[in-house]
Amino acid sequence: MKKSAVIFDIDGLLINSEPLWNKAATEIFRQYGVILTQQQYAITTGLRSKEFVAFWLHQFNVPVSQNEIVEKRIIELALELIDKEVTLMPGVEHVFEFFLQQNFKMGLASSSPMELIEWVKDKLGIRSYIHASCSAQHLPFAKPHPQVYLDCAATMHTNPLACICFEDSYYGMIAAKAARMTCVVVPAAEDIKLEHWGAADLKLSSLQNFGALHFNMLNP
């Protein structure tokens, strides 16, 4: 099926926010005796904050009653840090311009709160280009479940098979493929050689590298 829409993840793909989410989590977790290594953070990259918090508090035997409190505090601190410190990932302007020239519908699908999605649209100046904005924050299941991607396609009135998704995380890639969408992954430099990216339709080191050759390959 010919492609007609593109859907972007946000954290780690459009904005360099993953370190700031980790910074916020480190600060709040520390108050509960939870200390994580970078390798441990990598295990849960791509999960929404609800599952991320529940997983690690359980590992450190923190009472379940604290989950919601900890999640709320991490989100508040992370959004504050992102507003002050975040930078754009390389190639963001390039890839948006590319799909604008293709007259593609554009969507955002993230595990992050809608507040961050709205902030990103204004920060990047892309609000007028976005046809759908979907958050998995309050869905029954988040990535790697495909629902947030299916919701985004439905909002754009587009068949999932006509969508190209851009992701940076393993869970996001699985969600996009489960939604039967074409998936381009742009992993973090330290993870780019991992074998599990083989499930993607295309792997790039930067959004800046995406061009007509890749597009034609994905949209024969």
Image: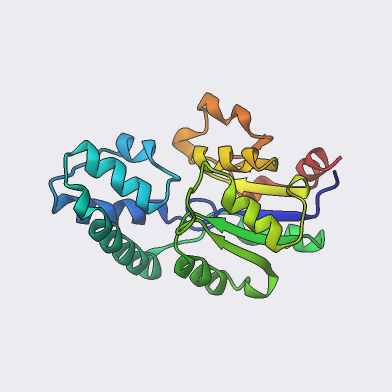
The correct choice, above or below, for 43 with respect to 131 in the image is above
Image quarter where the C terminus lies is top right
Q: Residue 186: in sight, yes or no?
A: no
Query: What x and y, as percent, mark residue 107?
Result: 65, 60
Which corner quadrant of the image does residue 27 belong to?
A: bottom left
Q: Residue at x 23, y 36 (%)?
A: 59
Q: Is residue 130 left or right of residue 11?
A: right
Q: 208 or 179, which lies in front? A: 179
> What residue is at 69 percent from the left and 70 percent from the top?
129
Residue shown at the point (59%, 45%) measured from the top left:
146
- As drawn, 138 above or below 169: below
Q: Which quadrant is home to the N terminus?
A: top right
* Residue 56 picture location, percent across and down: 26, 42
Instruction: Say how many tags the image has.
Output: 0
Farthest residue, direction top: 195
Residue 37 visible somewhere in the drawing: yes
Percent of width and height locating residue 112: 45, 58
- Give the residue drawn at x 27%, y 58%: 68
Q: Is residue 86 left or right of residue 156?
A: left
- Image quarter of residue 24: bottom left
> As rendered, which of 129 and 73 lies closer to the eye?
73
Q: Nearer the viewer, residue 149 or 80?
A: 149
**155 on left or right of 46:** right
In percent of width and height, residue 25 lies at: 27, 53
Colour approach in the figure = rainbow
